[in-house]
């Protein structure tokens, strides 16, 4: 009884074991790449024009291919499937057999560069799913879609050369990056605002760094970045990013993002022809750092994203009443409690020279005529009267507490830039108003408040910071 | 066979023809066995087979008695050893190359992936089968009559199995390895929680020191990998081989597998002439290795029941080989379909969320989420101490070798299963729904949480309930059954909770499909 | 005794009959004076609080002028303060084309209009608000010439918000082509959404149901009134004639669903 049990157990187990050894062996002996290589070889043999090419084709040995590049620390096995990549006969063939497009391989011999240095993907893998790094293969750098691939060029080349020689997409992306004011919120190389995340190395950031919850399609870096440009809040619901791009612009910028990688290429791979830095004048600095929020700075806007009013900073009414020194303080120290970053070297990384250029640009249209002085010190201000006036005149734009913010057109009167400002400047603003903004003139030209009233109001506003 | 034909070539031809017979003869020393005597000789004369008795009791061969669990565990270890040797050929223990080596094993080495799967799954299966084996030993009352210390060795083997698995988990140096190492080193540093409270961490940082010894630094790195590798391929295998040798040797010395005193009665209807005398000593001696049992017929056997033994060759060996092939086939079939996981390259900047230890430690991690010290060291320490003490606290010399001893035992086991499951599920449900002290009184002193947390309460309940069982039934044996059942239930349910029901930030989810997608 | 009493009564009655026209004339005179004073005080309040935006003539051409608001998708919307001289109001409880109810105007003064920077004036004394209301009514001749309409009766059925009703509402939403302006998923991004203008020729945006509350408030009753009265001066018509009452309530269910008001319950 017992011996029969053990004998039948032995028999059945042995059969199962042999069966599984058999199918496992079969699986090992017929990997995916072998199929493709056989197809490739058969194609060459069939289409051989003469006897000698046929012979050469027949002599092709089927086996795993690998390009080992020591300095790049890569073992690219891509050619195990893509064996026809250098063969002009395969120009029209279906993937994986097709020849590489363009003349890229002439200047970038595969033996020196391999494949993954530009295309990304998993160098060691030997099946398509894992080599291309599709989803759930736990590979951080899946194969880069061809529309973004020019991002890889900038690892070795300068933008001037790329613009002329086949890298125009990434070069345009770089221009856009400077024109859309990305650095107003994002730091790169220590320069830039702090509203957004530092984008250094974003092109080589692992998958897990990103929240992929709302990404449509494959969950990977490329789709995240592209869709984030399309609609930031669709990907990161709490995002405050003020970026409004066309589809093409989003694609170009995505390409450019792929140039921010942490690994540096070895010296003998890089080719920098032009070392000319783009000219940085006031206007381009304004575009790099200010334009994302302030637009052209002519009119003020209530912004639904920031939930507050963005002031018009290039408006003549503004530049006329503010002096450079006050402006410099605001730019350097930022405005606490608002989205305005502190731009000094130790914070957002702008040098004094840069800030001066920006101030020059902002105040470019400053009218010659200075506003009529108010003479604040002449008046004996009555804070209580000022409060009464504030509550009927100012409250519905600046809020009862003077904090401005969501749903209010006025700015936050409690921030240091106002509290520390010269009362003379504030009084002039109240008296004359600000053209291009909802701040109207309360003086004799407008709502007919006399200077005493205005002085009272300013005095009250100055006490706001002491209130709770 | 006349001398005249004995030319040199003739002899050569004859020898050539009889190679099979003479080789077998030399291997088995006395040729293919034909009689009980020669079958015995096979066993006695063979280095490996000598570990077995020449004759085996039929009770031992009953599949339903042992279910082959101990053997399966052993064979899994053998399979893991062999496949591990294969993997060692390609692996190199450096954080720069380890990950790539594993990738190469997966992608380039012929049958490399299969071997890695086999190694991984046989190792993890060992945990399950060692636990089941222990359960068999407890439920058949087989930790007595001189086997008490062997039980202790068994517990040591269980711990070694856990640690071997754990160290192996860290070798690929992927995200799983890295963050498991982080968690484990934090568990090792758990006494810090206690020393912090008493403010003596700066003088006596036992937790931090343990962590540093384990990691070879303060954070996982090359040193940690070297240490883990050393543990995994030299120290722990040596340890497990030694402990296993002793384990087997003692099984043999203690008279093979335990069996019921009255098994002879049941099987053959013949009672013993004289029931075994219980004489002196703490542990009664029941040795079976007398020459007497080689002969058939009734004998004044030292122990009993020679009638119901059969020769080990071939009965026992066929059984062992069948179990071996069964194990091997099972492991290969499983490995064929299910790949061992391998995640992204280790990245200290990107914590896995949830960062989980390997599954067999997730029960512990669940307890650690209440209190690092109690969950990571206190409670497991107490649980192991409890396991070690079972044979010393229950010394009732009755009902050996019978599953659950008797009807009452079966009832106690079922009861304890239900009560234990209810207790652990209840406490988990409570914590998940209502939180614990820290959620209620955010400023409470950590000492309170160390002293009173769901894990402690659960352990207290388990001990109290088994004492209650002892009191109710008047039998320490029932207490042992109850205690072990509840231990097993708690381990299984806590592990399940940690594996399946805990998601990012150790929050509760019914399944991984409800996790916030990443 | 008895006849004398009846006599007295009759005399009294006659006296009263004579006196009544007289008293009413006197009372009316007093009313007129009171009204003028009310308007005058309303004017004072108006000049302090409303003139900034709505202008001294009530034509929406105040010193503040156009307010610009950048939407979340970057589009800049120009908001013009309401022109009070046409007496066309969006948020009424009266049928389309009618004058607004007094209470409607007060509601707007009290609660303001979110996202349009019309502040809520609940804190100022009720007399001042009443006065301003009367003053506002002097801007348009319509208040004198036209008769006020009856407010729309709102009786909310039990089933509003049920999933069945939401499904029906979804079908109506599709049939009535609401999606052409409001977007097929209610996000205010329908194909026509970019070129909608109001009666004053200014660009306006169709409501995006995913952004929050309606300007008049998001109770089911308010939504129903919007469908029934329409938003005069905008592209939002009244559906009083094209949909029966039940269908309008189904549509209410669906819009509540779009605004996420049903999830919280």
Image (cartoon, rainbow, N blue to C red):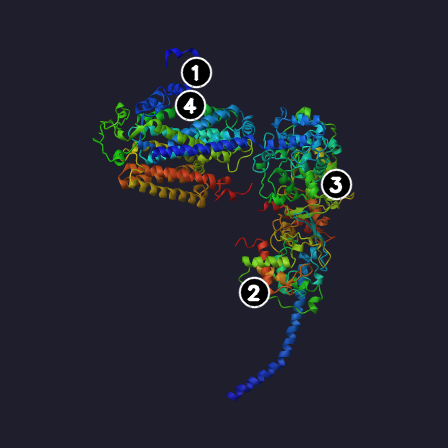
- State the image coordinates of residue C225 (x, y, percent, origin top left): 61, 62
Labels 3, 4: front one: 4
The crowd level at tag 3 (other Cα within 10 Å; few <14, some 14-19, many 20+) is: many
The crowd level at tag 1 (other Cα within 10 Å; few <14, some 14-19, many 20+) is: few
Chain letter of disc 3? A
- Say which quarter of the image contains residue B203: top left
Alpha carbon distance from label 3 to label 4? 80 Å
Chain letter of disc 2? C
Alpha carbon distance from label 1 to label 4? 47 Å
Residue position marked by numbered label 2 in the rendering: C155
- Secondary element under disc 1, as helix, strand or loop, is helix
The structure residue drawn at horizontal position 36% and vertical position 19%, both measured from the top left corner, is: B29
| Residue B133 appears left or right of A353 | left
Tell me, for residue B13, which label it has, or none: 1
Q: Residue furthest right?
A: A368
| Label pair 3/1, CB-CB below 8 angstroms | no
Alpha carbon distance from label 3 to label 1? 113 Å
Q: Is residue C74 visible?
A: yes
Residue position marked by numbered label 3 in the rendering: A363
Alpha carbon distance from label 3 to label 2? 61 Å
Observer-nearest residue: B169 or B137?
B137
The reply to whether label 1 and label 2 mark residues of one chain is no
- State the image coordinates of residue A420 (x, y, percent, origin top left): 65, 41
The reply to whether label 1 and label 4 mark residues of one chain is yes
| Residue A443 appears left or right of C250 | right
Residue position marked by numbered label 4 in the rendering: B238
């Amino acid at each position: 009884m017992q011996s029969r049990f053990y004998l039948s157990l032995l028999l059945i187990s042995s059969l199962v074991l042999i069966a599984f050894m058999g199918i496992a062996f079969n699986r090992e002996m017929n990997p995916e790449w072998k199929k493709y290589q056989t197809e490739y070889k058969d194609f060459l043999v069939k289409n051989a024009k003469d006897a000698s090419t046929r012979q050469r084709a027949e002599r092709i040995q089927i086996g795993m291919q690998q390009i080992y590049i020591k300095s790049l620390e890569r073992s690219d096995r891509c050619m195990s499937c893509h064996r026809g990549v250098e063969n002009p006969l395969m120009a029209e063939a279906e993937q994986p057999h097709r020849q590489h497009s363009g003349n890229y391989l002439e200047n970038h011999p595969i033996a020196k560069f391999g494949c993954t240095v530009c295309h990304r993907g998993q160098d060691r893998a030997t099946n398509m799913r894992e080599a291309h790094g599709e989803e759930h293969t736990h590979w951080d750098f899946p194969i880069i879609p061809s529309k973004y691939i020019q991002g890889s060029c900038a690892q070795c080349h300068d933008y001037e050369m790329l613009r002329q020689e086949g890298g125009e997409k990434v070069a345009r992306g770089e221009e856009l990056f400077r024109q859309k004011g990305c650095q107003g919120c994002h730091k790169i190389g220590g320069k830039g605002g702090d509203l957004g995340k530092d984008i250094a190395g974003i092109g080589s950031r692992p998958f897990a760094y990103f929240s992929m919850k709302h990404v449509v399609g494959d969950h990977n870096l490329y789709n995240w970045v592209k869709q984030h440009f399309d609609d930031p809040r669709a990907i990161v619901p709490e995002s405050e990013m003020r970026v409004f791009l066309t589809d093409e612009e989003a694609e170009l910028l995505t390409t450019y993002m792929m140039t921010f990688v942490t690994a540096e290429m070895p010296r003998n791979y890089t080719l920098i022809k032009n070392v000319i830095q783009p000219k940085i004048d006031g206007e381009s600095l304004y575009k790099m750092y200010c334009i994302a929020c302030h637009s052209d700075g002519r009119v003020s806007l209530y912004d639904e994203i920031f939930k507050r009013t963005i002031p018009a900073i290039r408006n003549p009414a503004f530049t006329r009443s503010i002096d450079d020194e006050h402006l410099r303080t605001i730019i350097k120290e930022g405005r606490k409690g608002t989205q305005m970053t502190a731009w000094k070297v130790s914070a957002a990384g702008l040098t004094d020279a840069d800030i001066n250029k920006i101030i020059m640009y902002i105040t470019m249209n400053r009218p010659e005529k200075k506003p009529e002085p108010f003479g604040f010190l002449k008046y004996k201000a009555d804070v209580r009267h000022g409060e009464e006036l504030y509550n009927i005149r100012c409250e519905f734009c600046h809020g009862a507490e003077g904090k401005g913010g969501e749903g209010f057109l006025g700015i936050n009167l409690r921030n240091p830039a106002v509290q520390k400002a010269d009362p003379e400047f504030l009084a002039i603003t109240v008296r004359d108003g600000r053209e291009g903004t909802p701040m109207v003139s309360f003086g004799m030209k407008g709502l007919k408040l006399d200077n005493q009233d205005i002085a009272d109001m300013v005095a009250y506003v100055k006490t706001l910071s002491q209130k709770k | 066979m006349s001398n005249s034909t004995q030319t040199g070539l003739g002899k050569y031809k004859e020898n050539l023809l009889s190679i099979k017979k003479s080789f077998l003869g030399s291997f088995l020393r006395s040729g293919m066995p034909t009689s009980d005597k020669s079958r015995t000789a096979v066993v006695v004369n063979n280095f490996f087979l000598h570990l077995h008795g020449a004759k085996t009791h039929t009770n031992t061969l009953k599949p339903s008695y042992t279910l082959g669990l101990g053997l399966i565990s052993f064979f899994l270890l053998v399979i893991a050893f062999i496949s591990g040797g294969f993997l060692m050929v390609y692996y190199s223990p450096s954080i720069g190359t380890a990950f790539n080596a594993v990738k190469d094993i997966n992608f380039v080495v012929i049958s490399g992936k299969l071997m890695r799967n086999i190694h991984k799954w046989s190792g993890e299966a060992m945990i399950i089968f060692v636990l089941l084996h222990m359960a068999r030993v407890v439920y058949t009352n087989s930790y007595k009559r001189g086997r008490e210390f062997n039980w202790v060795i068994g517990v040591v083997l269980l711990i070694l199995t856990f640690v071997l698995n754990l160290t192996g988990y860290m070798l690929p140096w992927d995200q799983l390895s890295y963050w498991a190492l982080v968690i484990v080193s934090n568990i090792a540093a758990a006494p810090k929680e206690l020393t912090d409270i008493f403010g003596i961490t700066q003088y006596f940082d036992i937790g931090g020191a343990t962590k540093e010894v384990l990691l070879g630094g303060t954070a996982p790195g090359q040193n940690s990998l070297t240490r883990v590798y050393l543990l995994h391929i030299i120290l722990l295998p040596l340890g497990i081989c030694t402990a296993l040798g002793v384990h087997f040797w003692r099984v043999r010395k203690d008279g093979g597998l335990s069996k019921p005193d009255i098994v002879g009665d049941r099987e053959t209807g013949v009672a013993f002439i004289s029931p075994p005398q219980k004489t002196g000593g703490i542990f009664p001696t029941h040795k079976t290795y007398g020459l007497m049992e080689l002969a058939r017929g009734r004998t004044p056997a030292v122990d009993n029941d020679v009638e119901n033994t059969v020769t080990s060759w071939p009965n026992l060996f066929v059984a062992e080989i069948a179990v071996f092939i069964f194990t091997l086939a099972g492991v290969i079939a499983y490995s064929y379909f299910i790949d061992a996981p391998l995640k992204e390259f280790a990245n200290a900047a990107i914590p896995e969320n949830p960062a989980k230890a390997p599954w067999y430690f997730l029960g512990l991690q669940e307890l650690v989420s209440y209190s690092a010290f109690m969950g990571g060291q206190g409670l497991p320490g107490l649980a192991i101490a409890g396991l070690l003490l079972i044979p010393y606290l229950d010394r009732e010399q009755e009902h050996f070798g019978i599953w659950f001893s008797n009807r009452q035992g079966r009832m106690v086991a079922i009861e304890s299963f239900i009560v234990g499951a209810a207790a652990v599920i209840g406490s988990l449900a409570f914590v998940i729904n209502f939180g614990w002290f820290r959620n209620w009184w955010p400023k409470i002193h950590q000492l309170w949480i160390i002293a009173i947390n769901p894990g402690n309460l659960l352990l207290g309940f388990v001990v109290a309930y088994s004492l209650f069982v002892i009191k109710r039934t008047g039998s320490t044996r029932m207490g042992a059954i109850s205690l072990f059942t509840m231990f097993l239930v708690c381990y299984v349910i806590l592990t399940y909770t940690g594996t399946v029901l805990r998601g990012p930030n150790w929050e509760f989810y019914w399944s991984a499909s409800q996790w916030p997608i990443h | 005794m008895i006849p004398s009493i009846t006599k007295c009564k009759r005399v009294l009655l006659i006296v009263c009959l004579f006196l009544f026209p007289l008293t009413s004339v006197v009372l009316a005179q007093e009313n007129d004076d009171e009204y003028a004073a009310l308007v005058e005080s309303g004017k004072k309040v108006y000049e302090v609080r409303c003139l900034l935006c709505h202008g001294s003539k009530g034509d929406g051409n105040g010193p503040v002028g156009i307010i610009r608001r950048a939407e979340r998708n970057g589009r800049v919307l120009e908001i013009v303060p309401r022109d009070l001289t046409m007496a066309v109001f969006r948020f009424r409880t009266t049928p389309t084309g009618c004058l607004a109810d007094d209470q409607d105007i007060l509601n707007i003064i009290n609660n303001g209009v979110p996202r349009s920077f019309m502040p809520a004036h609940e804190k100022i004394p009720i007399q001042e608000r009443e006065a301003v209301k009367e003053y506002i009514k002097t801007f348009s001749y319509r208040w004198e010439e036209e008769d006020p309409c009856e407010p729309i009766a709102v009786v909310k059925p039990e089933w509003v918000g049920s999933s069945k009703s939401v499904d029906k509402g979804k079908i109506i939403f599709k049939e009535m082509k609401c999606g052409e302006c409001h977007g097929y998923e209610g996000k205010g991004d329908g194909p026509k959404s970019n070129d909608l203008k109001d009666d004053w020729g200014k660009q306006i945006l169709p409501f995006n149901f995913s952004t929050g509350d309606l300007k008049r408030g998001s109770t089911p009753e308010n939504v129903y009134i919007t469908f029934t009265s329409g938003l005069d001066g905008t592209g939002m018509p009244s559906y009083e004639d094209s949909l029966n009452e039940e269908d309008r309530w189904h549509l209410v269910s669906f819009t509540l669903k779009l605004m996420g008001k049903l999830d919280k319950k």
